[in-house]
């Protein structure tokens, strides 16, 4: 039980107790022995009537004054999170190409040195995200053109759009190997905020790790 409710019931108990005693005292003074009507008792009589009037007034107002303080969850002013928006995204980032296999612990570690070349992903901006399910977008992967059912990001959100994950179509797992996927950051869309996500992927260009490793570091911002 909240403090406010305890306040209400406690005051009601005290008021009820004294409201019960005051009429009894007034009855004795009003209808008792005539000798009680001397001046001191008249003063007591008037004071008790005043106290009774105050108690009755408090009794009528205590409920509203206490209950007005009952805890109510404040109305949130934060804009609700929106579904993943389809449409154009500005792209920045890099592809790091290696000869053979490398060891990399993921985004918590720096990009390994020794890469033989890089690709600036900003030249592929913007990319168009298409909705393929209620909570899933299809977006071109790295420097590969988007073809339906081909190599692409499948970016999906949870039911309240507060978090995302991503995967690839089956053809990616058939043509490549050792695929590791990382969501580095995600900013959901709201009425006042554009969606953005930072994705990183490490993979080998041939099945069975027989090709060359690549790291794709890609950042997409809704336009």
Image (cartoon, grey):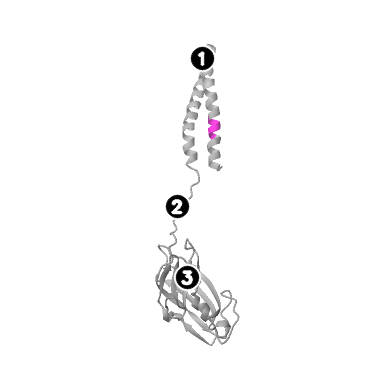
CA distance separating discs 1 and 2: 58 Å
Give the residue furthest to the top. 34
Q: For this rendering, which residue is in front, 44 or 172? A: 172
Q: Earlier in the sequence, mark 1 or mark 2?
A: 1
Query: Which residue is rendered at x = 48% and y = 68% of the image?
Result: 156
| Residue bearing mark 2 | 75
Crowd class of label 2 (few under 14; some 14 to 19; many from 20; radius 10 Å): few
Query: Which residue is rendered at x = 55% and y = 32% of the image?
Result: 13
Crowd class of label 1 (few under 14; some 14 to 19; many from 20; radius 10 Å): few
Q: Quadrant of the C terminus?
A: bottom left
Evaluate if marks 1 and 2 touch, with contact meaning CB atoms under 8 Å apart: no
Query: Which residue is rendered at x = 53% and y = 41% of the image?
Result: 4
Q: Secondary structure at mark 1?
A: helix
| Residue bearing mark 3 | 155
Q: Secondary structure at mark 3?
A: strand
- As displayed, is residue 165 above or below residue 206? above
| Residue bearing mark 1 | 31
Residue 15 in picture, x, y percent from top left: 53, 30
Evaluate if marks 1 and 3 touch, with contact meaning CB atoms under 8 Å apart: no
Residue 143's label in the rendered image is: none
Q: Earlier in the sequence, mark 2 or mark 3?
A: 2
Q: Which residues are magenta?
A: 11-15
CA distance separating discs 1 and 3: 88 Å
């Amino acid at each position: 039980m909240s403090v406010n409710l305890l306040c209400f019931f406690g005051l009601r108990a005290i008021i009820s107790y004294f409201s019960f005693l005051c009429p009894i005292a007034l009855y004795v003074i009003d209808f008792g022995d005539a000798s009680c009507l001397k001046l001191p008792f008249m003063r007591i009589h008037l004071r008790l009537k005043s106290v009774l009037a105050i108690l009755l007034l408090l009794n009528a107002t205590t409920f509203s004054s206490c209950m007005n303080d009952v805890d109510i969850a404040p109305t949130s002013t934060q804009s609700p999170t929106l579904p993943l928006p389809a449409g154009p995204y500005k792209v920045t980032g890099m592809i790091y190409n290696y000869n053979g296999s490398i060891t990399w612990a993921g985004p918590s570690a720096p990009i390994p040195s020794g890469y033989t070349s890089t690709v600036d992903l900003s030249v592929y901006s913007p990319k168009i995200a298409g909705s393929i399910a209620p909570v899933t977008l299809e977006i071109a992967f790295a420097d590969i053109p988007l073809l339906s059912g081909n190599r692409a990001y499948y970016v999906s959100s949870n039911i309240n759009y507060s978090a995302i994950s991503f995967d690839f179509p089956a053809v990616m797992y058939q043509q490549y190997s050792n695929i590791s996927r990382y969501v580095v950051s995600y900013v959901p869309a709201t009425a006042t905020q554009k969606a953005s996500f930072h994705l990183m992927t490490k993979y080998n260009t041939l099945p069975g790790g027989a090709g060359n490793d690549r790291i794709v570091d890609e950042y997409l911002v809704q336009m």
